[in-house]
Amino acid sequence: MAKYFWRGALLFAVLPLFSQAPPNKKTQELLRFTLNEGPDRIVSLIGPPARIDDAVPGYQSWQYEFAPDEQSDDNSPPAWLICLRTRNREIVSVTRNFDRPQEVDDLFPPAETTVHYWPSESAAKFSLRLRPLSGETLLLAIGTERPGDRTTQLVLIRRSALRTFMPWLAEQLL
């Protein structure tokens, strides 16, 4: 009888390992960036940008088209958006937009993830999951707040850049 109990207990313990979804390759590719790359390294990783926008003083954004196997139109955001400081060519953020909502739970382990709301938790109109990575690098899943939520936008961003681009989040992280 004890033999069957232990077999059942073992099966119960390993069953979650088989039911977990494998990492999403589309979302995992964002993690190849550290924000310490220079422009030359970005070009070697994903090629030259389709467009360069320097409308925001002090910053430049490199914009990349969607791959042929992804759907997009004239109203679609760029598939990749790399933001650089113009004065020192430092990468400030890397944004990956997707044509369809993506599963991102493998990137946001609950023990390492916090949820933030704009403009505040009590008046939430927008949410995101945040996971600190190495140094001052943060990973954001835009428009999500709990495991199972899918997103069409992931952002790697320097914590120091939040004051400029997401001041409400910078304030919440104080």
Image (cartoon, grey):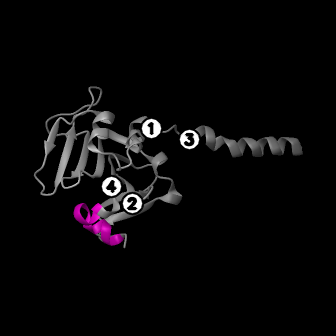
In the rendered image, residue 89, in percent from the top left (x then y), is placed at 23, 50
Secondary structure category for the residue under label 3: loop
First reached walking from the N terminus: tag 1 or tag 4: 1
First reached walking from the N terminus: tag 2 or tag 4: 2
Q: Which residue is mark 1?
A: 24
Secondary structure category for the residue under label 1: loop
Residue at (13% x, 36% y) in the render: 74
Q: Which residue is mark 2?
A: 136
Q: Is residue 82 above or below residue 70?
A: below
Asked if marks 3 and 2 touch (Cβ < 8 Å), the reply is: no
Secondary structure category for the residue under label 2: loop
Q: Is residue 118 above or below residue 152?
A: below
Asked if marks 2 and 4 touch (Cβ < 8 Å), the reply is: no
Residue farthest along the front direction in this orientation: 88
In the rendered image, residue 21, in percent from the top left (x then y), is placed at 52, 39
Neighbours of disc 1 within 10 Å: few (<14), some (14-19), many (20+): some
Left or right position of 23 against 119:
right
Q: Which residue is mark 4?
A: 157
Asked if marks 1 and 4 touch (Cβ < 8 Å), the reply is: no
Neighbours of disc 3 within 10 Å: few (<14), some (14-19), many (20+): few
Please state which of the two labelled residues, at mark 3 or mark 1, is closer to the viewer.
Answer: 1
Q: Is residue 166 above or below residue 54?
A: below
- Range shown magenta: 161-172
Q: Which residue is mark 3?
A: 20
Secondary structure category for the residue under label 4: strand
Please state which of the two labelled residues, at mark 1 or mark 2, is closer to the viewer.
Answer: 2
In the rendered image, residue 53, in percent from the top left (x then y), is placed at 13, 46
What amino acid does circle 3 point to?
Gln
Mark pair 3, 2: CA separation: 30 Å
